[in-house]
Each structure stands twice: as C-alpha cells, then as structure tokens.
Image (cartoon, rainbow, N blue to C red):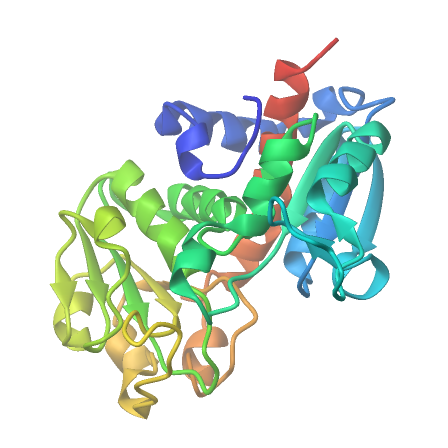
Amino acid sequence: MKNFTALSDLNPFGEHLKGALALKKDHRKAATLGQGKTLGMLFFNPSLRTRLSTQKAGRLLGMEVVVMNFGSEGWQLEFGDGVVMDGGKAEHIKEAAAVLSQYCDVIAVRSFAELKNQAEDQADIVLNGFLKYAGVPIVNMESATGHPLQALADAMTIEEHKKRAQPKIVLTWAPHPRALPQAVPNSFVEMMQLMGGPTAIAHPKGYALNPELTRGIPIYHNQEEALEDADFVYVKNWSASSPYGAVLNTDPSWMVNLDKLGSAQMMHCLPVRRNVVVADDVLDSAQSLVLHQANNRTYSALYVLHQILQANHA
C-alpha cells in the first residue's frame, strides 16, 4: 500500500480488517519495523484522538514522530498552480511537500472541509496537494471528504462487539449547534458498504450524503423506523447538503437516548456534546462503545502504518 487516503486502499477490506485485529493482539512483534523511519504529522485543524493515537501507533512501530500544527506554526500554504504569490501565503505546496519528504518517511495530514465552497471541499485540495507533490507515502488523518482511520477503528469495534454474523448497522444524524463536515459519515457509509449486512441511514430532509456513497442503503427521514431492530447505532451530526454547509435543523427530538436505542449498541467518533447529540443515559451505559472506538484508533493507525512500512521496506 503506497498511500492511505480512503478505505478502498484496504482491498480486500475483509482480509485487512482481520489483519488489523490480529496485529492489535500481537503488535509487539512489529516493534522494530519502523526503526530509522520518521513519521511527520501535519495538523491544519485541532485534534485529540487522531493526534495521540497516531503518534502512539508510530512509536509502537519504532518510528520517530514529529508533529507540526500548521495552522499556528507553519507558513500559510498556496495550493494553486500559476498563482502570483503577492498576498498572505508565503510558501507553495510544491516546495513544502518536497522539503517535508526529505525529513519524513511517511507524512500524515489532517485538514477539514471549510464548508464554504462545495467544489473546493470535494477536490480535497490539501490532501491531494501532498499526494501530488510529496515523494513519500501519505496518510489521511481526516480530510475534507473522509476520515478512513476512524472508519477502520469503527469496523474493528463492530467486529469485536457484534452478537450475530450480519448485524444491522444504522447511521443516524443528530442535532448540533454548529455546522460540521461530512467526512466522518462519508467514511462510515463506505465502511457500511464494505461490511455488508442490513444497513440504514436516518436524517432530516436536506441532509443527504453523497449519493454515490449511499447507493443501495435505505434512507429514512423517520429516525425511529430506521432504528428498528438495529444492532449498532452510529450517531453523528453533519451539515446540510443544500445549501451546502448550512445548519437547517436543530430539532432536539433527533437526539439519541436509551428509549430510542433499545438493545442496540451506540457508537460515536467523539468529541460528543452530551444531551444535545447523545443523552447522558446512553453515554454512561454499557451500550456505549465510544471508549472502545477511541482505543481502536491506536490500532487502526498502527495497522495502516504497518502496511505502508512493509510495502515500502528497503
């Protein structure tokens, strides 16, 4: 595997999922795989779980890890070609990516959607800029359109906690006071398609996700109908599809509580706003898997870095 930018890079997904779970159980055998290698982690946006879990994963493999908060510590980058750089942007991605490739053996990038221009967000300018101009493997730590490290951790969590071979997995929108990107739900839907079995998506009108991703999955505007017979309920807010990036609905009746959840297990990527997105009675119950998901973030990153190091071993 040269780069990791989407779950589709793990093909066939089922075999890679088994591999990730196996490596989690016996990761010490790979403790020297990354010796003499440097992982550079670039953050254009805030992070807690992604930063610490990926940093820990690199160190578990024996890598040196360097972290840079580009938003506050780096020069503002220009990503356009042929631009006359007489404004506020001091460095071009061509030089920045090339220089970082001299310092790092793997570069991991985190850059959110700005939710202003849908075409620009869909183009994933930051991630694709590094893919184009870097000379080393690139790992997506959440881009404008996807968060595959989270989705792999979610798949691992489902596999570890499922009570039947083909559990019903439901993704439901929940209210939030701010406009949030669609990256996490996009990758979760991709994972749902790869896992197989019964699925459903629930959201208010106006919040449709990319139809190329959701093709074949039943879509509900009634949350209770979607949650019927669910084994896993993934709760997540995302902003509207039209007008793009808007907050059209803050209806508190979409918050998930134990009455709605029934016997299902609840998932969320964190951070979560208690009693807005998910009620206390769910988060404080044994049906909440959020801490298991967060723990698996280390092992999803570990597996991805392990695969990249093996593929590029010299």
Quadrant for the N terminus, please.
Answer: top right
Nearer the observer, 256 or 190: 190
Residue 172: x and y, percent? 29, 68
Residue 239: x and y, percent? 38, 74
Q: Is residue 6 above or below residue 144?
A: above
Q: Quadrant of residue 176?
A: bottom left
Nearer the observer, 116 or 162: 116
Q: Residue at x 52, y 67 (%)?
A: 114
Residue 168: x and y, percent? 22, 52
Q: Is residue 6 above or below residue 241?
A: above
Q: Quadrant of residue 111?
A: bottom right
Q: Say left or right for 7 vs 264.
A: right
Quadrant for the C terminus, please.
Answer: top right
Q: How many marks?
A: 0
Q: Quadrant of residue 26?
A: top right
Residue 305: x and y, percent? 65, 31
Nearer the observer, 283 or 43: 43
Looking at the image, the residue that sits furthest to the top is 314
Q: Residue at x 14, y 68 (%)?
A: 220
Q: Is residue 254 above or below residue 239?
A: below
Whether residue 233 is visible here, answered yes or no, is yes
Whether residue 228 is visible here, answered yes or no, is no
